[in-house]
Image (cartoon, helix red, strand yellow):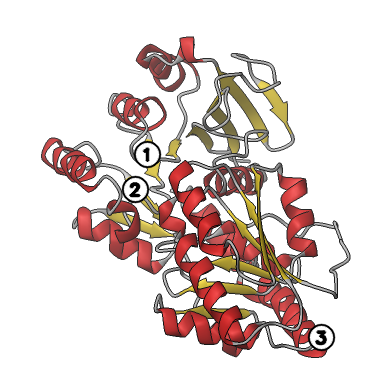
Amino acid sequence: MASRKRILVAAEWFPPAFRAGGPVRSVANLVEVLGETHEVFVVAGAYDLGLNTPLEVPHNTWIEHPWGQVQYLTRDRWQSGLWHHLLVETLQPDFLYVNSLYARFFALMPVRTARKCPEMQVVLAPRGMLGAGSLAIKPVKKRIFLQASRWLGWFDEVVWHATSEAERADIHAQFPTARVKVAPNLPSAPSAIAETRRSDRWTLVAVGRLHRIKNLVFGVKALAKALRNAPSSRPIELRLIGPAEDADCLAEVLAAGAGVPGLTIRHEGALPPDAVSKALSAAHFLLMPSRHENFGHAIVEAWAHGCPVLLSDRTPWKDLEAAGAGWDWPLEEWAWTEGLTQALALDEAAWNRLSEASRAHFATAVRTPDSLEANRRIFSA
């Protein structure tokens, strides 16, 4: 029997870290699948996003899991020599998987070190960092980085992991000759958590880091206008779940909804995955007017919990009204005002049909055998 191929994953955040949102779940779900067919090692930071206190796990030593092993590194170990030790001297993996584009220690250093091992294949997942919405944030700094990387050939030999055809196009726009493989992100399996949804109010949730790319000021303004034009028969509670990465943005979101009759907005901060599952299980809609989403773990997790979604057309998920799993509207005020008015006027029977269709959409369009196999094929040669 042939020996299993070995993969070393570089990821700055890995569970129990959760504050970085989707990228953490992406790599955690991927290694669980790959562990069935490959030897998997994960090298991660010992900290959650924005925190200096280390995670409550053993540090700087390998920890066994059913899918493989993980090591959480304290910052004193974040030196290029460590990658030489892991990649060249000890593990000598067949594949290096990098779960970032810009991170110095968890992306640039291991990619550079891997050049010493021509038989090792580097797979790089940009995680939406080359999308137009992402590039519009700190554009000068990113433009200089991308120009330098092209001139110096930093990524010439890598295989890029795109999670959609749209991301393939984003990669080729910056690196025209790039070798790209497409495999969708893998969502978490449906949770058994079930909460009772209140019938005396609409509960909306927005899940993710509070950042301008999420465009929540726009979403709340549209919600406020919809309520003023056609007051809902139920009061509305909007729960903001995620760290306030941009304090000014959070203040603007809260201000946009202040004083609107029937609307309450609460910022609950970053919550662990189980608490997010409970929130989605108790919610009637996920609100995500994002300027760009590479995948949107909150979207598919909402469907898994029977929660329809209210999205912009800047995500990979299209034609949702036809699927009965929610809506994807253009980022125009009129479209969102009309759409929200329609969604908030649904009766219980109509909403229940949306909820059941959302669960079905998760099962048939998201976590499928084909999506699992597509991810394994990235590491098959």
What residue does disc 3 label? 348
Seen at 58% across and 74% down, the residue is: 310
Q: Which residue is found at the position 48% from the left and 16% from the top?
A: 90
Element at label 2: strand
Crowdedness near tag 1: few (<14), some (14–19) or many (≥20) residues, C-alpha within 10 Å: many
Q: Tell me, for residue 122, which label it has, or none.
A: 1
Callout 3 crowding tier (Cα within 10 Å): few <14, some 14–19, many ≥20: few
* Residue 183 seen in the current view: no
Density class for disc 2 (Cα within 10 Å; few <14, some 14-19, many ≥20) is some
Residue 361: x %, y % from top left: 66, 77
Check whether the beta carbons of the residues at disc 2 and disc 1 lie within 8 A of each other.
Answer: yes
Q: Nearer the viewer, residue 257 or 158?
A: 257
Going from N to C along the chain, the mark reached first, 3 or 1, is 1
Residue that appears at 69% across and 43% down: 271
Q: Which residue is mark 2?
A: 159
Q: Name the amino acid type tagged 3.
A: Glu
Name the residue type under label 1. Answer: Val
Mark 3 or mark 2: name the one nearer the start of the chain: 2
- Residue 217, compared with residue 70, is above or below; it is below
Q: Which quarter of the rendered picture does the N terminus lie within?
A: top right
23 relative position to 106: left or right: right
Mark 3 or mark 2, which is nearer to you?
Answer: 3
